[in-house]
Image: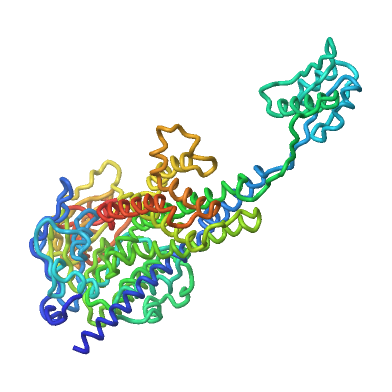
Amino acid sequence: MCQHSSMPSTTAGPALRLRNLRKTYKDVVAVDGIDLEVHRGECFGLLGPNGAGKTTTIEICEGLTSADSGEVELLGMRWNSHGGALRQKLGIQLQETQLSEKLTVVETIRLFRSFYHQGPTTEEVIAQAQLNEKRDARVGGLSGGQKQRLALGCALVGDPELLFLDEPTTGLDPQARRQLWDLIEQFKAAGRTILLTTHYMDEAERLCDRVAIMDHGKVIALGTPRELIASIGVEHIVEFSASPAVGTPFDSGALGRMDGVSGVRSENGSVLMQVTALHLAVPALLGELGRQGVALTELRTHSATLEDVFVALTGRHLRDE
Amino acid sequence: MTNSRDSARAQSALKDQALVQLTLVRFREFLREPEALFWVFGFPIILAAGLGVAFRNRPPEVLKVGVVSADLKSALAGEKLLDVTEFRGGHDAELALETGKIALLAEPGADKQIVYHYDDTNPDARTARMLADAAIQRASGRADPVASSDRLIREPGSRYIDFLLPGLLGMNLMGSGIWGLVFAIVDARRKKLMKRLVATPMPRHDYLLSFLLSRLGLLVIEVALLAGFGALVFQVPLRGSLVSLMLICVIGSLSFSAIGLLISSRLQTIEAASGVSNLVMMPMWVLSGVFFSAQRFPEAVQPVIHALPLTALIDALRGNMLQGEPIAQLAPQLGILGVWLVVSFSLALKLFRWR
């Protein structure tokens, strides 16, 4: 039994603090010296490609994997001294859990609820996860989005102060993703802390107050999505495909010298320009292509995203298929 | 102070509830798996019914014999256990013998001798020879120096079904004990459900305890069904006390559950679990005297056979059900089961991986 008097205060200090965290599997360095602080009430995202060390990091925080070295402090407590108390205060959703297909939604929630001292009632959790209509349906018959909402419901049964979500929307269709985002935002609105991992930049941009971009076990950038995007000095990306006139070699060098363009590279037969001033770059591009006698087959622009931040930092995409 | 006492009480009530919920899940998962229901409840009864009918004791069989003279036929007419056919020619008679239509052919030989044609490796033929010869000798005026009479015993308890049913019961307890744990645990580990449960405050001993509780619950149904079926349909005796019978079943089932826990302590795939479980159970299906007495195996391996948990369980079940032995007399068997239980469970706790 834990003694309440000796329990550290759980309202002051950061929700999560990692210091110089390291973890090696055989000869692979999964986590290579990570320092992080997650503030109370914020939604913090670990963004990075598969194999960046996101899951290892979050599982060390969850007390499921032990670090080789470094310190982990959650809600002012540590795993080795306050494991039992911590388990009561955390909500956890794992990446690859398959809940028992033979049980119904309500039976599954009731099972998980029985492990916690306090929290909402089973029916409240079902309503929160928007599974009222599926209350008595077998888990095996749920859609991917419903299963993921059930997994989230199971993470919420103990009324957690800190919620860990490991790739909560991977593999879901756009509508199911938006539905799950709504639920996460509701939880966030209640002032609780969330740490989530994702390799979807739009998910991180929409949900996260702050983001740490991870690559090869290290944090390579940290800040709000807006700060990170601003840090690469690029506001827009212009992407086009063109068919050069016969016999005329296309000169992409000229594009880089245009006003308002900070970088040019080609990828899969199309050209991507990093642009600081869209109103200067687009007319200049059209003029240059006209002079070279090149016909556009496609022209797109978008505001810079976290994906572009990752590309600018590593030269690779978040999702290299 | 009141506060901490209250919360301690609330905590213990909740812990009970976790165990209740986990045990309910075990029952639900089992009852919603039609195949498991069949193998645990249906299959042993079908097997008992099939073997019970196939090996039932039949009324004494009437043996067919052939003769080639009317004198011999009348001499054999007094023997009710022989069905005598008279053949006109020796060729027809020999053909009938060769094709197994008759077990014995009797014909007059030289000097008033009787010649019997039969296959001496066929028990029916040897019986027919003895019956026919005795009948002919008696018809020719032989007097038996000692008078004899028969008293027939066809009592339940000594038939094949009586021997078989405790064997099937033991085999069933082994199968459901080992499979019940191995499949559920390895499946939960494979699906990362175990890892998810470990990420909650779930008391880990409650998780393991829920398997034993559900096993004991299902055990009552298993035993009642199979023993009840035997008693009602085949009049298999239940001579020992039912309390002792249940105690034997509980200890046996817990031993096999512990072995199942040991098997499942590290395995990651259902294929591996299935292979290892069969490897563990197969020798016992053959050696432990489920279908035939384990005494048939050579003397040298008897100590090994008797140390197997299934042998101990089946011996104890037969001792209780057929001989009505009191529980104290079955202490050696229960002791062997107890050793398997303690050793397997301790090893399993050391080796068990929660992910």
Q: Position of residue A177 (x, y in %)?
A: 35, 68
| B191 horizontally vs A293: left or right | right
Q: Position of residue B159 (x, y in %)?
A: 62, 45
Location of residue A171 with respect to A176 vertically, above or below: above
Count the marks: 0
Of residues B131 and A49, the one drawn nearer to the viewer in this rendering: B131
Of residues B75 and B287, the one drawn nearer to the viewer in this rendering: B75
Location of residue B42 with respect to B141 vertically, above or below: below
Of residues B180 and A77, the one drawn nearer to the viewer in this rendering: B180
Residue A314 in sight here: no
User: Residue, x 91% and y 22% (percent of image)?
Assistant: B70
Image quarter where the N terminus of chain A lies is: bottom left
Q: Position of residue B17 (x, y in %)?
A: 36, 75
Choose top left, top right, bottom left or bottom right for residue A237.
bottom left
| B260 horizontally vs A36: left or right | right
Residue A139 in sight here: yes
